[in-house]
Image (cartoon, helix red, strand yellow):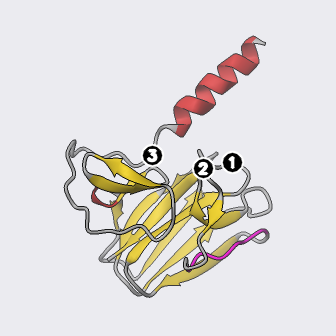
Amino acid sequence: MRRLTWFLVVALSGASAGCSGDDPSPSDTSYAASSGGTGTANGAETLNGCDAPTAEDHTGDATVTIATSGLGYSPACVKVKAGTQVTFNSDFAIHPLRGGDASSREEDESSPIEATDSGTTIAFAFPSAGAFGFYCNIHAPSMAGAVFVE
């Protein structure tokens, strides 16, 4: 029983790590989330635990790679320009990828991220602005992230 309790404490404490940044009061609320899982944190829209002001900035990159790292994504929260290609690297049989709200496991039909259950690499283009959540269909809601497109 002690092992199970320790595992749950470690797993839950790791699940809370994610997209917080150094700025304690982000104010950019220009991203309207395209999928569910939104709320407000310090006045900013959040999606799957991420918010645009603290997301890892890749707006200068034409391509971005997101990989699984344990039971998480690295990076989990990214900000890109419209037209950017985002590549996901994972074993999708173990971590099936979905685009949408991790807390409800509701897929977003408007998301460029398509359901992926096999293979190890897949890329999606993000042609227009918005906020697009993604998650592992087995390990959600703790294994999730978002792409913010400007």
> Measuring 37% from the left and 84% from the top, which residue is drawn there?
82
Q: Secondary structure at mark 1?
A: loop
Mark 2 vs mark 1, CA separation in Å = 5 Å
> Measuring 26% from the left and 45% from the top, which residue is drawn there?
42
Residue type at mark 2: give it.
Met
Q: Nearer the viewer, residue 61 or 53?
A: 53
Mark 2 vs mark 3, CA separation in Å = 10 Å
Q: Secondary structure at mark 3?
A: loop
Q: Considering only vertical position in the picture, is 145 above or below 21?
A: below
| Residue holding disc 1 | 139
Tell me where the magenta segment starts and ends, as one range: 112-117
- Position of 143 with respect to 17 (left or right) is right
Q: Secondary structure at mark 2?
A: loop
| Residue holding disc 3 | 18
Whether tag 2 and tag 1 are in contact, CB under 8 A, the answer is yes
> Measuring 70% from the left and 72% from the top, which residue is drawn there?
115
Q: Give the quadrant of the N terminus.
A: top right
Which class describes the residues within 10 Å of circle 3: few (<14), some (14-19), or many (20+)? Answer: many
